[in-house]
Image: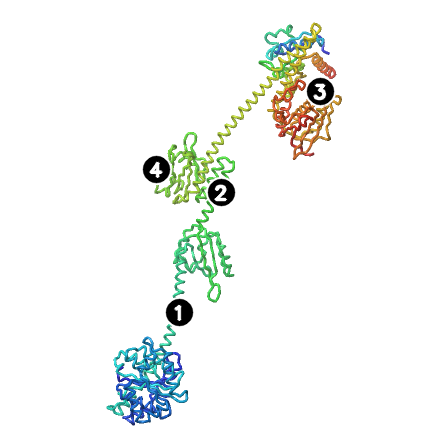
Amino acid sequence: MGATVCYILKRTNLIDRETDVPDSITLDPAPNSSRKSTTDPEASALTEDSHPESNDHAIQFYDDDHFLAESVSTFICKGIEAGEGGIVIGTPEHREAVENRISNRVNLKEAKAKGLYTALDAAETLSGFMIGGAPDSNSFERIIGGVLHNAANGSGRKVRAFGEMVALLWAEGNREGAFRLEQMWNELRRKHSFSLLCAYPMKNFESSANREVFERICQTHSHVFPTEGYIAPGHSGQDRLKTIALLEQKARALEAEIADRKRIELCLRESEARLQNLLEGRARENESLRHLAAIVENSDDAIISKDLNGIIRSWNSGAERIFGYTAEEVVGRNVTVLIPPERQHEEPGILARLRRGERIDHYQTVRQRKDGTRVDVSLTVSPVRDDAGTIVGASKIARDITEQKRVEMRQQVLFDFACVVNRPVGLPEIFEAALTAICSAQSCNRASILLYDAEGVMRFRAWRGLSDEYRRAVEGHSPWKRDDSAPKAVCLDDVSKAELNDTLRAVVAQEGIRALAFLPITHEGRLLGKFMIYYDAPHHFTAEELQPTQTIINQVAFAIERQKAGEILERTVNERTASLREAIAQMEEFSYSVSHDLRAPVRAMQCYAEVLLEDYGNKLDDTAKKYLDRIINGGVRMDRLIQDILTYSRLSRREMELKPIPVDKVTREIVRQYQDMHSSQADVQVEGNLLSVIGHEPSLAQAISNLLHNALKFVPPGTMPKIRIRSEQRNGDVRLWIEDNGIGIKPEYQHRLFSVFERIHPEKNYEGTGIGLAIVRKAAERMGGKVGVESDGVNGCRFWIQLPAAPVT
Amino acid sequence: MISNDTIILLAEDDPNDVFFMQRALAKAGLSTPLHFVRNGQEALEYLGGLGKFSDRMEFPLPSLLLLDLKMPFVDGFEVLTWARSQPELKQLPIVVLTSSAEDRDRQRAAEAGANGYFVKPPTCEMVSEILALLGRGKEDTAVSA
């Protein structure tokens, strides 16, 4: 647009708009102006009618100062003449030119006096509200507002104002300041009612680069007035008319275009915003979708979707890994291809639950791979709904739990095996358990155990799934030497590729073995034998896989050694038992001999002494007879001693059959048998019915008898023995008390009382062998009981013998 | 009752016991000669009429055997068992005369077929008892016959 491009734009509603982008702009080509221009070619720039309307904000471009002065003075004069206030904020030159022209039409002095005309210096006024290079709206409003207020005489009259402070800013190059100031003027018109005319020297916009700025300036004004070039002399009325018509057309087209463009722009912006939102949302969605897809794709689990008929709709790489099918192979097929025949019944149930909207969580089952092998899986199946909430299919996550199962199974196998090993069972049972355990742990169905025999040949001791021919053919073979201190496991993953001699290879092939492992059984560095594991197909053995098997083998080795040790121990025990039996038999023989041979000479002495007394008594004096009596007494004591020793040793070794004993009957029988205990010589009381016990009757009778004799014997001279026999319950036992009125035993001696040959009272008044109470104790102990004594050493003794009570019948 | 023609064989290795038995028999009023052997082996030979005992005039078959249990070479139980296995000796009264008072010996002797069991030393009373025992046996036989 060149300097000549100029038009009048009338904008409506401009100032009422918050935004500076108007909805619509109507073209008002100031028809009067065009009409007048045609009739009055010399007319000034602004005709009476073409001036800015009240409350209008118009702009006047100009090339020549005179033209400006003419235009402004006309604008102001018309106001003064109508009784309106007029304000001119201009450069000194312009003010002078304008006032000269006004003076031609009205009395300026009078007008000034009435306050109808106010003139301000543009630069000076401008400096009043410029802060930091930018117009300050508050200061502007205060200063200009005040001027407007005065000119309006409060609000009593209309005001017309001309200002070229904007032009000054423009000339300084402060374009932003100029725009801002234009806006301030517009804003000011919301508070004050006035018509404003701005003026810009057109030369500032001659460059085409300024077109945009020019248009922007026009937009801030409700009227734009072209420069004088269009109405200046030199143009014929027709030309001007044409020019104006053209301008109007252009302006109209431009206006429409601008309006359209604004509308489009607005629409575009809105669309753009919507699009932006949309894009952002989509991007977010895409992002999360991509994220999800990555998760699905990279999952170790099989993630499969299927419809309600069980048709597979999607298939991730996890599924491909686990089941062996590619997505291409399987999508569109029924999910039942993954289900082994024996589990086909599961799917209808799963589908039915899905249709009911149920979710299936961690359902452990078995599925089938493409190659037909089974895989342990944990299934989580969830219904998938469409936007309307209708169940349309299912997502299925299958986790391969083969490893987990295997670990669990191995633990179970080890546990079961440990249970067997820790029971007292023989090696064959342990071998069988070991084969079972290893077959389970290794998932194989053939295994064997070979051990060195006495000749140093490895022989089958237990096996599973091996033919007799095979065993005969390979028995004795070993990959290790017997004295190999660290034999290593030998694993042949594929027999056909292994280094084997031809014979062995043929035998192994004949047996259908494709992979096998030799696992040494060792104990403390000694090779005991080997464990063999066989597979029908090539098998990749791993150290990790063989670990549970190794544990089992160690246990077996331990069991073998334990068995050996046990056998040795048993042999030793048997040998010792035999030799003990022999020793006891010899002892038996010895005591038997003692009872005969030791007593024979004693008896002979005794008997010969008696013979002497009988046959030669009349030839002997009393002293000789007394000596013979002593010999006889010595013999009697010696014989009793020997008998007591025999009794004691017999008690020690006699096998006793323990059974209920009627203690009351046994005791009363003993009392009745012995002369010493008859009432003339002793007071023996059996209290109540004595309780029965479990024991050995002859031994108990011996003990009771000894205790009674003891009680009779140890009484002070001249005292009638008084014995009380009673029994009492004592924690499932019966305690039999034998209480006397004898001389008692001091507590400090009581612990020695029941030992062999202990005699607490050596005085000849209390003769004894020193074995009687030892026999009592021995008898009680052999019967599972005990004995004791209570005494203060003065007032007799209370002996007791305690035995398990007999069941009450 | 036992009369003076009763022939008693004593199998006893202890000469003291032989003496006491002879004395006891004498005191009991039996004048019958006492034949004796010093061990089980001799007892078997005497009873079987073997070797030096082949002359039945000098060594007549006894009508009572007094048998010690503990003797060298062949003991009393073996003699007892053997005698009970011989048809002509089945009815021979055999009385065990031993220093063992043990129940097991008493029981074992009875099972082997002894007619009586007496613990040494031999006394006049013991002889009476033995004779009483034999007489009763004879009476029983007479009654049953």
Residue at the far right in the pictured view: A680
* Tag 3: amino acid: Pro
User: Which of the 4 quarters of the picture holds residue B9?
Assistant: top right
Q: Which residue is mark 2?
A: A415
Q: Which structural element holds mark 2?
A: helix
Looking at the image, how many numbered discs can be counted on the residues? 4
Residue wearing tag 4: A501
User: Label 3: which residue?
Assistant: A717
Q: Which residue is mark 1?
A: A278
Q: Name which residue type carries label 4.
A: Asn
Q: Tell me how far mark 4 sits from mark 3, CA to CA.
A: 104 Å
- Asked if marks 2 and 3 fall on the same chain, the answer is yes
Q: Which chain is home to disc 2? A: A
- Rendering coords of residue B119 (x, y %): 66, 16
Could you classify mark 1 by the number of other residues whose Cα lies within 10 Å: few (under 14), some (14-19), or many (20 or more)?
A: few
Which of the marked residues, 2 or 1, is nearer the chain's N terminus?
Answer: 1
Rendered view: A790 above or below B10: below
